[in-house]
Amino acid sequence: MDSKHNPEKTFLQGRGAQFHAPNRFEKQISSYENIDFLDEPWMDDTRTEFFIEHSKKIINKVSSPDIPAAYSINPYQGCEHGCIYCYARNTHEYWGFDAGLDFEQKIMIKENAPELFKKALQHPNYRPDGIMFSGNTDCYQPIERKKKITRQLLEIFFDYRHPVGIITKNALILRDKELLQEMAQLNLVSVNISLTTLNEKTRRAMEPRTATSMQRLKVIEALSNLGIPVNIMAAPIIPSINDHEIPALLKSAADAGALSAGYTIVRLNGAVSAIFEDWVSKVFPNSATKVLNQISECHGGQLNDSRFRTRMHGEGPIAISISNLFKMAKLRYFKGRSMPKLDYSLFRRPGPTQLNLFK
């Protein structure tokens, strides 16, 4: 982390976003002022609220051509992890919330997800295809410890012998290690652990409510020792913040037993741009301009980038330098390793007892 890391006194510890960002769909906005007209800023209540969402479907089609999964399942919307760079922040605006603090504080829970998933699998026209779990927000975020919706869905995946890919940065996944081991023995699961930094100061500021870097390495080791295939995602890479860590990240993950690695370069679409700019100016005041300029250089002079097949890895000298560094590190530490292919041939619909549930 920047040697002069020095958040302002008003920095909300334990949160990534530092303010309520305007919602692009709202025609009116509200603001708060101190009733005594003092200079001290208004500090919002930072407690987390939970809302029950009665979804009509749980399997979402992925239309992006640069994302390998055909579908995604998200048992939760919003994410208490609070990662400052998260592209999913923008989706919170569709719920009438904002992409800033609301994204971290107001979490939607899809309690009927297991019922919806089972019903979808029972449809006679359903054919197994790649499902990412989750494609939007972390399926193992803190509320999962209580709600266990991810666990219920995994049990359905296993019962139907349906493959699934999981991406998470939470050590809670170890709760389900026995089930994941059974699935791995049938090539029904692949796990992707997000590993962005080995510097705890950076991690606490950038991903405030996630598992520590050392915990994630222990997760990789524990899963790998059980024969559960693990890929690590060094994502996102942020120039001048964590790009120099690429070799160390890949070496640590390989030493822990990971079979493969991937990366993306940060892109700041929609409201994420203003949220990130505010954050980086407070956390890295001396290098904020450099960070933002280098991100822009990777995306054609813009902080945001929606161009398919370009947005993930960027372009230009800085992006090429990051790509080359990653390729060299991967060749050195992952040579001869690869993730096994998932087996879609085992898909089945369990017996008449479950079939009768949907007649």
Image (cartoon, grey):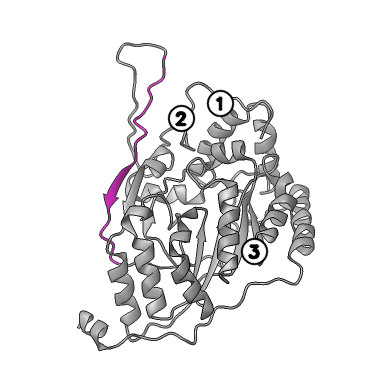
Task: Give the alpha-carbon distance from disc 1 to disc 3, as whole Å.
Answer: 35 Å
What residue is pinned by disc 2? 12
Query: Which callout, 3 or 2, points to the residue nearer the camera?
Result: 3
Label 1 secondary element: loop
Q: Amino acid at mark 2?
A: Leu
Say the numbered circle drawn on residue 258: 3
Q: Quadrant of residue 285?
A: top right
What residue is pinned by disc 1? 7
Q: Which residues are magenta?
A: 40-56
Q: Are marks 1 and 3 in contact (CB under 8 Å)?
A: no
Q: Amino acid at mark 3?
A: Ala
Q: Measuring 65% from the left and 57% from the top, which residue is drawn there?
A: 263
Q: Amino acid at mark 1?
A: Pro
Query: Which callout, 1 or 3, points to the residue nearer the camera?
Result: 3
Residue 235 visible here: yes
Query: Dot 3: few (<14), some (14–19), or many (≥20) neighbours within 10 Å?
Result: many
